[in-house]
Image (cartoon, helix red, strand yellow):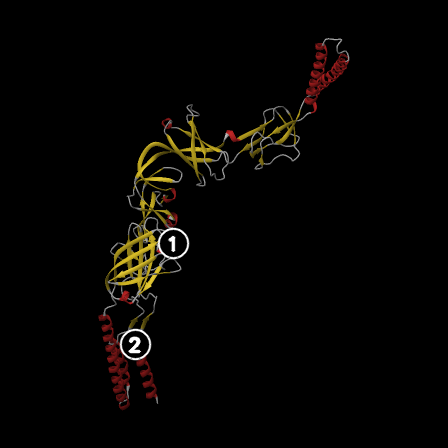
Amino acid sequence: MTTIIKMAIHLSWILVLLMPRFVFAHAGEDHGDEARAPVSLSASGSPLELKSPDVELLGVLQDGKLAVFADRYATNEPILNAKIELESDGRKLQLLVTKDGSYTAAADWLKQPGTHEVVVSVEASGLEDLLIGTLEIPGLKSDEAHGRAWVDYGKWAAGGITGAIALLALFKLIRRRKGAVITLVLPVFAAFLLGGHSNQGFAHGDEDHGDKPKDAPIVTSVNTVAVATQTPPVRLPDGSVLVPKPVQRLLGIRTLLGETRDVAKTVALNGQISADPNFSGRVQSSQPGRIAAPGGGFPAIGMKVKKGQILAYIEPAASSIEKGNQQAQLAELASNLGLAERRAKRLEQLVGSLPQKEIDAARAEAVSLRARKAAVAGSLFQREALRAPVSGVISQADAVAGQVVEAREILFGIVDPAKLWVEAVAYDTALSGQVAGASAMTADNQPLTLAFIGQSHQLREQALPMQFAVKPPLPILSVGQPVKVFVQTKQAIRGIPVPQGSVMKNSSGETIVWVHVSAERFMPKKVNVQAVDANTVAVLEGLQDGDRVVTQGAALLAQIR
């Protein structure tokens, strides 16, 4: 019984050792020990990139299905609702529009390996173009690898059958002979079989379990990288970024075709917003007195007022002596007025007996005394009304009921927000007579269009004051707000005009612009620029004619890592 137990234990041990250790690799897994490549791009099939002066096409072929993105070459705007037809070797393929704005088609001949000459016609609103190119369809995996795998399977099967026969023979020997020698023979024989037995690994699902890094990029003949539409944007080792077409449309990337031309030389000045003196005013007291509110109360800052509207009252302020003298004068005038009126009435009754000139003189004296009495009485009891000199918005209000003010003290300021000026100072006297145009930019990057008014020929703090009128439409501005003024001179320079938003700084503080070098690749280029106006700069160095400069989304490209 003891011998039988020992034989069962040895047999179980041998079976465990002889079990082959299978290794299965599943889709999407990485079974290697090597680290991932710094830039991992998934190949999506054969790329098709075609360009013309008007159209840029990017197609990705996978499993006989072609996905195409069509954009305008100069601006990178998507071409929507177009009629796109592909023809190769007499076979025509009509592409269908998808929901995301791309185009797709499928055909059996797109699965045939080889090089195919293709002609693509594009028809859209105001656009007709014909593009010719080559589509390369790679072949399937070589049959040699599959044949070799079958040979390995055959070797494994033969080894298994041989091991099974050897085990049967060994069992018969054990049944005939019992002892310690047989006990030692079993593990030795099992180790011999195990050493000649190879572990099998199975790779499937179009996976790469070799030594090459996973997701190696495919570089085409036009120096572009074919990527699947689901590939995220990445920064490449040369500093450029690879942005798939769907991501470009999501970010709203737009470009401008660079063209060298003459642009006006521009000088940047510091300035500030000022009020137009023809449409602004101040309300001041003409005499000392006490402020009183009008019927509707004092106007507040930001309230609209009309010309002639009463803003406040001034009650004249006088000392007791001055008031006493005025009251005495008023009493004297009242007495003299009474005497003059009675004398005029008596003379009127003697018409015909007296000369008419005496009667007229008496009447005139009475009228004069009446006017003098009214003037003196008004100086004692009548209030002065402070009225708005122009229509506009209250920008300053310093009036409080009961406040005592002096003459010429400013109580209200009125500004018309639609009529504003910009005052700048120039330290270069050579600008005199060289101004051809001007624009401005606020601190929050709001552009202003300016009209040159004039320049002083007298220095103020070693600078020449210059005035400009802000042309409508006007953003919300405040008097005294600082602005950057760009004065265009009559001198010209050569450069490529690009929008101000295209220019930015890299991590080293260098001035760069992003250039669209291929369908999905953008390259930063160092440039030397000079401001042209509030919205435009001229690239003097670093670009060539025909470069597609990114005008929208440049800041988003710089954030891709």
- Name the amino acid type tagged 2: Pro
Q: CA distance from mark 1 to mark 2?
A: 53 Å
- Name the amino acid type tagged 1: Arg
Q: Residue furthest left?
A: 144
Q: Is residue 407 left or right of residue 162?
A: right
Q: Position of residue 548 (x, y in %)?
A: 32, 47
- Using the image, determine if residue 418 lies above or below residue 355: below
- For label 1, the crowd category at 10 Å Cα-Cα, with few meaning under 14, some 14 to 19 and many 20 or more, is some
Residue 124 in sight here = yes
Asked which quadrant contains residue 174, the reply is bottom left
- Using the image, determine if residue 71 lies above or below residue 157: above
Residue 34 in sight here = no
Residue situated in front as seen by the camera: 193 or 119: 119
* Label 1: element kind: helix
* Label 2: element kind: loop
Mark 1 vs 2, N-terminal side: 2
Tell us which disc is closer to us: 1 or 2: 1
Asked which quadrant contains residue 462, the reply is top left
**What label sits on residue 419 in the rendered view?**
none
Q: Position of residue 156 (x, y in %)?
A: 25, 77
Q: Position of residue 501 (x, y in %)?
A: 39, 44
Q: Residue at image x 28%, y 51%?
A: 52
| Count of numbered labels shown in the rendering | 2
Evaluate if marks 1 and 2 touch, with contact meaning CB atoms under 8 Å apart.
no
Q: Is residue 324 left or right of residue 406?
A: right
- Using the image, determine if residue 207 lies above or below residue 346: below
**What label sits on residue 20 in the rendered view?**
2
Q: Position of residue 63 (x, y in %)?
A: 31, 66
- For label 2, the crowd category at 10 Å Cα-Cα, with few meaning under 14, some 14 to 19 and many 20 or more, is some
Quadrant location of the N terminus? bottom left
Q: Which residue is mark 1?
A: 249
- Using the image, determine if residue 331 lies above or below residue 126: above
